[in-house]
Each structure stands twice: as C-alpha cells, then as structure tokens.
Amino acid sequence: MSGESGDQSSDDPVDSGGRGSGEDEGSAPDSGVSTDSGAPGIKLDVAAGGEQGGDGGECACVDVRDGIYLLATSRELWFYDPLTSAFELLGPLGCTLAEEATYNSMAIDRDGSAWLNVMTLNLMDLAAPIGGEVHRARVLDPADCEKTAYSPDSDFAKFGMGFATKSPNDNCDELYLYNQALFPPGTGALGRLDQQSLQLSDVGAANYGVAELTGTGEGRLFAFADGMGSAVLVEYDKETAAEISTTPLTGLSTTSNFAFAAWGGDMHFFTDGGGKSKVTRLDFDGNEGGGLTVTVAQAPALFVGAGVSTCASFTPQG
C-alpha cells in the first residue's frame, strides 16, 4: 500500500520519538537493519467471532509474518517490525521492468505473495495514458516474481492497493484498488480486483486524487489520502466507497513517495524524508494517548509500497 504523489514537501508531525520515549524529532531513532531472516513464523489470524489466534480455516495463512512488508525504490522487498522499528532486507525483486517503468504500490495476501503495481510513463509523450501492470512475487523468495495478465482500461493503471477480510468473521480477504487520478483533482475511485480472474469491479467514486490503501483482519479498509495540504486518514465502506470516518493528519503529508499500513491497532506511515523514508506512527486506537509520533527518523531505503497481510495483528501487541 503506497504510491507517488505530486507533493514534494516533507512531513512534520507534532510529536516525535520512539514508542513511549518522548524524544523530539531530531532524536528519533535511526533505522535498525537486520540481514538475518530468522524463522518466518506465521502469526495471528482472525477466527470465529472476530477473535485473533489460529491460522486454519478456508483461507489459511501461508508464509506470511506478523509485521509490515515494504517495497523500496531500489526494487527490493523489505520487512519492518513495528515493535522494534527494525528493518530487514528480504531481497531484490526478480521481475523485469521496462526502462520507463517504476513500482508504485504493494499489497500482501494471506498466501505469501506480494502484489505489485507497476506504472509506465511514455517519456516521449507525457500526455499519453499511463500504462499499468500487476506483478506478483513470493515474500519468502522475492526473486520468484511474475507479471500477471492484468490489463487496465483507461483507469486503474496507477493505484494504491490493500487487502481486507470480507468481514470480522470471515478469514478470506479481497484486494481493493484506489485509482490515483491527479487530474482533475479529487477524482479518485475505489475498485475490487478478483485474484483469480484479475477482473476489476467498481466499488464507487472517491474524493481524493491520490491515496493509498491498507486493510485489516477484522474487515476494515483505510486510505492515506492527499487532503490538498495535510493528509487525511479515511475509513471506507468496502461495498459503497462511502466514507465511514475521516481523521485529519495535521502536519503530515503524503510527499512524493509514500506508503502506509495498519498494524497492531495503529497506522504506520512511510513518507519521503529526503531520499530515505521517515516512519510516523498514529496511535489510532488511542491506547497510548493518541497522536502522531516519528518512530524512525531515517529508514535504510526509500519506500513506495507497504503491505500487511490480513493474518497480522490488528490489536495492540506490546
């Protein structure tokens, strides 16, 4: 779940520092980088009644870890542990991209695959329509990557993306896309992509030109959207695209490269901090007093995609 916007400004949230640390922005923790893959460990899932625990059922969890996967501009897949703020390089992606193509967004399914949006610009004719593709890579081996048969129409070539379960009581998830339409502003759209047929169905119009998506194992769908100034966090009705709630993110902007994911009851935003991503956490569930906190002042890479499977934690973990 991530993307690129036309906003080149940096973000400047009110509060900063590690979780509960009270540090100021200048002393926010630097990146912790690990190259030890460790045991992947399938963790946490929704079960009957919406409770967490267990990985069985019709749509079991396979090869996914309890944390946030990240897509770097360097065409690498990373893993981020929100509890420790540690980053782990998983490896380069094996898909071949055209010279003018770039990765734009990512979502992670329950089966251990990263779904990747690739956009292509015609540098000889910038008025030409943007080309769009969907690639798929295995998170355990990012070199195992393939281009799918997805073929967009004039819309949904460049989009944000995220998985959400069908309901709090249904383990199976669905892939949602947010069409990123810069012109005219405020003309986005929400769609649903069938994972087998790769056919897109419209959900409804949306009010933001640029936005990214993330979903949870309790069936909720959120967008990190460009609010024409400060960014906003929007929760959408998955069936109608109606806005359930809108939260202003004062002092935070989407920047030129951005991503975000929901994990552990909070929202984690990855924005361009000057060539490397800065990580900002929103205490969404309010269990630590609410507000925005810079948890990593400078990540080891610049990220344009973030994905968390619906197997991952959606209530506080530590």
Image (cartoon, grey):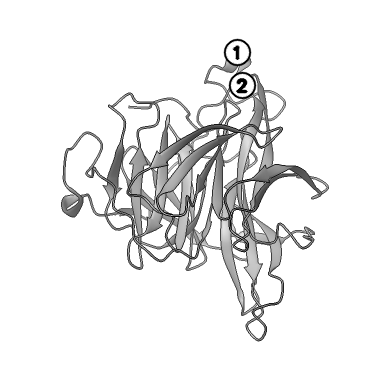
Quarter where residue 159 is shown: bottom right
Of residues 157 and 226, the one nearer the viewer is 226
- Residue 135 lies, with reference to residue 207, above or below; the image says below
Say whether residue 318 is visible. yes
Pick the front one: 246 or 40: 246
- In the rendered view, tell whether residue 74 sits above or below residue 124: above
**183 lies above or below 52:** below
Secondary element at image label 1: helix
In the picture provided, is 23 more to the left or to the right than 124?
A: left
The CA span between labels 2 and 1 is: 7 Å
On screen, residue 113 above or below 255: above
Q: Quadrant of residue 97?
A: bottom right
Q: Residue at x 80, y 59 (%)?
A: 149
For disc 2, the marked residue is 168
Q: Position of residue 226 (x, y in %)?
A: 49, 52
In the rendered structure, the answer to whether residue 149 lies left or right of residue 314 reads: right
Where in the figure is residue 269, as x and y percent of width and height? Answer: 41, 47
Residue type at numbered disc 1: Gly
Q: Which residue is mark 1?
A: 49
Tag 2–tag 1 contact (CB < 8 Å): yes
- Residue 238 location, x and y as percent? 67, 33
Res. 95 in view: no
**Earlier sequence position, callout 2 versus callout 1:** 1
The amino acid marked with disc number 2 is Pro
Residue 240 location, x and y as percent? 70, 34
Q: Look at 46% across and 61% down and name the residue there.
A: 257
Mark 1 crowd level (few <14, some 14–19, many ≥20, 10 Å Cα):
few
Q: Residue furthest top?
A: 49
* Classed neighbour count for the residue bearing mark 2: other residues with Cα under 10 Å, few (<14), some (14–19), many (≥20): some
